[in-house]
Amino acid sequence: MKGVPILLNNKAFTPFHFYSSFLGSVASFYRQFPQEKITFFLIGEDEKESFFHTYYFDPISIPLFLSLADQLSKFHKESITLQLYNTHSTKKVLAFLDRSDFFKISGDFHKFHKNILSFNKDFLGFFDSNKQRPEHKVRFYSLNEGVITNSISTLPPEQQRDYLIEYYTYKVKDHFEVILNESSNNKEIVFDYVQILSELITNGVLHSKSDVYALMFTDKERTCFSISDNGIGLFESLKSKQIQTVNTNYKLFDLYNELFDTIPLNVDKKIKESFYSIFEALYYSILKDRKGLFDLMTTVVLNSDGYFRLHNHNAQIIISLRMMRELYVLVKLRGQIYDCHQKYISKVIDRNEFEETFSKLTLHVRDEFKKLITNIISNYNSDVKYSSIRLFEVRFKGVHIEVEIPKKY
C-alpha cells in the first residue's frame, strides 16, 4: 500500500509543518504515482511497533487536513483510505481526534455523508475517560444542510447572504462564544468576532462554493482558531461577487492589477496571482459596509496581540505587530469608511456626500496598502526566511485562515 504518513515521531503536525512539509510529500506521491490514489497512514508503517515515540496533532491543523482530504476525495470520486494504528504511542492522538469529531465529520456516519476518509472504526471508542473540553470540536458548514438548501433556494443572491449570515451567527455563538468570552473581557471584541466569523463562513459556502471546516481551541497559553475551505480561491470569489453599486470608487482588481504591473516579485505567475489576490481581498474588505476579513486581521493583531495567517492557493501572509505602524493607519481609515457607510445607510448624509467622502478615503487606503505591500515584499526580497510571506510551489486549493491569540495574565 503506497501513501504518506501524517504524524512523525517528535514532529508536531502544525500548520507550519502542513504547509512546508506535508503538502510537499503529498505532491511528491502524485508525481511518483500519477495514476494511483493516495493512502494516508496515521504514522509510518515502520513505526507501528514503536513504544516510546511521541506524536502530536495541533488542533488547528485539523481543518487544514480535512480540507485537503476533501479535495482529494473529490478528485478521485471516492473516499481516501486512512490507515489507523492503535499503539501505546498513538492512543492519545486517536482519542483526541475522536473527541474532536474528526472521524465523525470525515467518515460515512456523518449526517451529511461526507465520507471523505475511510478507516477501520474498530480502532475507535475504547479510550480513557474524557478529559477534553466539549468546545474543542471541528465544525462543518455546508449549503447541503437541509434547512439551508430549502430556505435559500428561492431567494435572490443578496437575500441569500443575509439569511446565511443570520443563520451562521447563531451557529458561531453556539460553537465558539464560550471560548471567545474566556479569551477576552471586552464584549465588543467578542461581538465583532462572532459577526466576522459568520461573514467568513458565509463567504466560504456561498461565494467560494465550498464546504467549510473550522475549529477553535484554547489552552493555558493561547486561543487558536482555524477556518478552511477548498473552494475557488480569493480571485475567483471576488469575480463572482455582486459589487455594491454604492461603492462607485471601487473598481474590481484595480489594486491587484497595479501591484502585478509595478511591484517586483520574482516568482512564477500563478504564485504572484495567489499572493496579490490576498491583498485585493483585504482591500475590498476594508471598503465594505460589513466587518469581515480585514477587521478580523486587525482585531487579532492590534486588539489581541495575536498572529493572523491567510493562505490562498500558493501564497500565505503572516500578519503580526511587526506591521503595527502601517496597520494603525489602515485601521483609522477603516473606522472612517465604516462610519461613512453607516451615515449613508441611516440617511444622515446623501449619496453625493457619501461618494465625495468615500472617494477621498478610497484613494488614501490604496496608497497605504501599497506602502504596506511594498514593505512586505522588500523584506521578503532581502530576507526570505524571516519575512511575512510564504510562497509555495504546491497549490493548496481554497482559502485558509489561522489565528493565534496569546493569553494575558
Image (spheres, grey):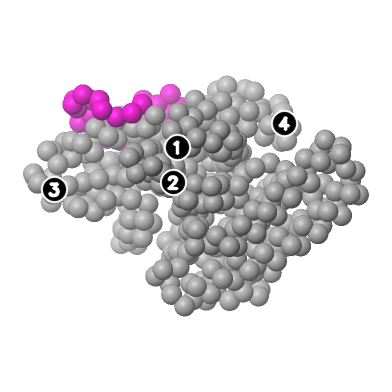
Could you tell me how far apart the alpha carbons at marks 4 and 2 are, in whole angstroms?
A: 34 Å
Disc ID at residue 405: 2
Would you say residue 258 is visible in this rendering?
Answer: yes
Q: In the rendering, at what x and y percent does residue 152 appear?
A: 66, 27
Give the magenta range. Answer: 109-134
- Marks 1,2: beta carbons within 8 A: yes
Mark whose residue sits in front, 4 or 2: 2
In the depicted structure, whether residue 5 falls above or below residue 163: below
Q: Main secondary structure of the magenta part?
A: loop
- Marks 3,4: beta carbons within 8 A: no
Name the residue tied to disc 1: 183
Q: Which amino acid does label 2 sit on?
A: Ile
Question: Is disc 2 placed on a helix, strand or loop?
Answer: strand
Q: Earlier in the sequence, mark 3 or mark 1?
A: 3
Could you tell me how far apart the alpha carbons at marks 3 and 4 are, in whole angstroms?
A: 53 Å
Disc ID at residue 53: 3
Would you say residue 115 is visible in this rendering?
Answer: no
Q: What residue type is labelled 3?
A: His
Disc ID at residue 159: 4
